[in-house]
Image (cartoon, coloured by chain):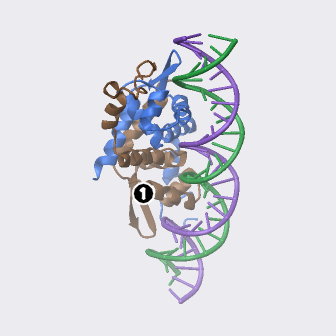
Chain colours: A brown, B blue, C purple, D green
Amino acid sequence: MIEQQKYCDVCEVFNPDNSVVEMMKEKKLDDDVIYELSELFKTMGDPTRIKILYALKERELCVCDLSELLNMSSSAISHQLRILRNNKLVKFRKEGRSVYYSLDDDHVICLFGQGLQHVLEDR
Amino acid sequence: MIEQQKYCDVCEVFNPDNSVVEMMKEKKLDDDVIYELSELFKTMGDPTRIKILYALKERELCVCDLSELLNMSSSAISHQLRILRNNKLVKFRKEGRSVYYSLDDDHVICLFGQGLQHVLEDR
DNA sequence: CAAACATATGAATAATTGTTCAAATATAGT
DNA sequence: ACTATATTTGAACAATTATTCATATGTTTG
């Protein structure tokens, strides 16, 4: 076992004491959290939804506002808003036949800012 | 035109002066930036890649480290690393036959933290 | 109640995506 | 030169996704 030399200390499964694998595994996030985290980012990983969130950053808007603004069908917008709603990125308020959407909390804006910083970094 | 009552001030296309549409359109982000931003979030929107980034947060690791750590084939890991590389989330360094990957900058960690805050908020 | 409007929803379709498998490239040791 | 190891790559396949279309729900006005 020992004479079988390995070059990656973590791949070294024959020497548990020196293994980083276990260390990492202890520190690992709940699978639930990892899943939710990836769902959050996935939700923000679509141009249409980015545009919706960017618009809602300014003020609350109803479906037809967004539809007009982004030049897309109300149906398409509504579908995307449902995804944003399910992931708690937007909340809504009904007024007559209109439904006004707004950002659910300010984490979204922070994520936005951080993302922009990363994107605009090397230009 | 005027007698056609509308309930969403933004949808009101017949009165440009009072329209919020134009205002928003002026403030709108470059399509390039929106695209890149959504690509960034899309990149972070996968459980495997989240796990990779979370592991790299601690220290640099090579492909077989990650493969061992996440219990996945080197091929699968390599494919995901390519996506992370293309989106400038990780950088790499070659040493012998190994390729060590690490986080490209600390925006990733900030995004991580913000995302976690959002996810863990209501529990 | 009927007509118009705002939104939501389900099915369908085209496009994208993650993993697997097989094969290729590259580096190190014998 | 040969073998073992580390990584990359391309094709293939199943699964997911965004938009469109048609239709349904709910609300307001006449």
Image spot of residue C14 (x, y percent): 70, 52
Disc 1 on helix, strand or loop?
A: helix
Decide: is D3 above or below B79: above
Residue at 50% x, 28% y: name it: B88
Decide: is B22 above or below B97: below
- Left-right relation of B116 to B30: left
Residue at 40% x, 22% y: name it: A9
Image spot of residue D4 (x, y percent): 55, 22
Q: Quadrant of the N terminus of chain A?
A: top left
- Report crowding for label 1: few under 14, some 14 to 19, many 20 or more residues within 10 A (C-alpha): few
Query: As shown in the figure, which amino acid type bears the numbered disc 1?
Result: Asn
Decide: is B97 above or below A68: above
In the image, B113 versus B64, the foreground residue is: B64
Q: Is residue A70 visible?
A: yes
In the image, B17 versus B8, the foreground residue is: B8
Image spot of residue A80 (x, y percent): 51, 55
Query: Mark 1 sits on what residue?
Result: A86
